[in-house]
Image: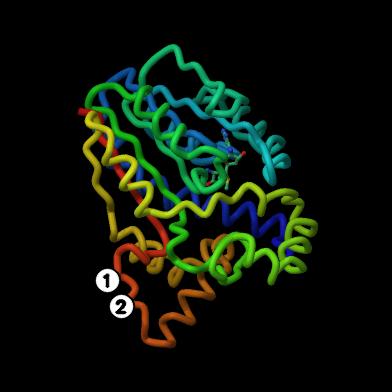
Amino acid sequence: MKIHKRDKQTATEEQANFFFTELEPYIASLGNNSAVLEVGCGNGVLLQKLAKCFINVDFHGLDSFGDGFEDTHQSIKRSLRSGGFDFYNTNFESFVPNQKFDVIFSINTVEHLDDWKTYFELCASWLKTGGVLLTFAPNYSFPYETHFGIPILINKSITYFVFKGHINTFEVINSHQNLWRSLNFIKKTEVLKFLNSFPCLQISEDQKIVERLVFRLKKDREFSARYQSLAMLVTLIKRLGLLNFLLKVNFLSPYMKICATKK
Ligand SMILES: C[S@@+](CC[C@H](N)C(=O)[O-])C[C@H]1O[C@@H](n2cnc3c(N)ncnc32)[C@H](O)[C@@H]1O
């Protein structure tokens, strides 16, 4: 169950490549001196790639390296050495930007936030008119926890009660202390409902993200190493002949990509 360091590095690159492709259409159309912010930028590998490719755009990243992610603090130093983006070592709750942004995005971060509603409120206020907020995250309406690779049994406390041993061992051997505690079991339907209550935002979702993830999991060994438990689950679902059904039942979709544009 331990994820090896070399596998981790290659998989991080592969994950960054996947999300680079997801973000490219939004960033390629930006003019000179546009500004892009990643919240929960982790090791900064994706920002580094984006900054190398889109030299006319200013990139910014912030991360607090809180529960379960303390060791990522070291790896961002590598990305920062090559420059290309500004980094703020803070939580989003304390961040006071001195500018507005054309694109704000987060990848696999909102499911770790103590208060995801405040996150969306603040991001909406940091967007320029016409700016876009992109959210990529697991959807906890789907009864599977991807970090730990376990089924969700009714709710977080019952799941913990049943899988306590597995969860504690996983956190220790992967140096992810408090990772379980950080999870808020966010659901796509709740996020959509909340974002739709903002009169200043136009909301859309990209349901095809799951198909692209599944395709990538099939093609790319390093990528499936990063999403090992998701890859195993997808294989099982396919064997049971349930994949097409799941792709059609939107609220159960295991992953979300939500786009909010400021009017
Ligand atoms: C699963 S990691 C994702 C990192 C990166 N986006 C990726 O996909 O590899 C979640 C990140 O969110 C950060 N984070 C959690 N709560 C935060 C907060 N309140 N403010 C800023 N960053 C936070 C964590 O430190 C961690 O680096």
What residue is rendered at 74% in x and 66% in y?
Answer: 164
Is residue 87 or residue 169 the one in the foreground? 169
Disc 1 + disc 2, Cβ < 8 Å: yes
Residue 185 against residue 61 in the figure, above or below:
below
Q: Quadrant of the C terminus?
A: top left
Q: What element carries label 1?
A: helix
* Residue closest to the eye, 102 or 9: 102
Q: Where is residue 200 in the image (x, y as percent from the top left)?
A: 23, 29
* In-image side of 172 versus 10 (left or right): right
Query: Residue at 48% across / 35% down in the picture?
Result: 47
Q: Which residue is drawn at 64% across and 61% down?
A: 157
Residue 238 is situated, as x and y percent measured from the top left of the image, at 41, 82
Where residue 57 sits, quadrant-wise, is top left
Seen as rendered, the residue at the extreme bottom is 240
Ligand 1 is in which quadrant of the figure?
A: top right
Reading the image, the residue beneath label 2 is 245
Question: Where residue 183 sits in the image (x, y, percent)?
Answer: 59, 51
The local secondary structure at tag 2 comes to helix
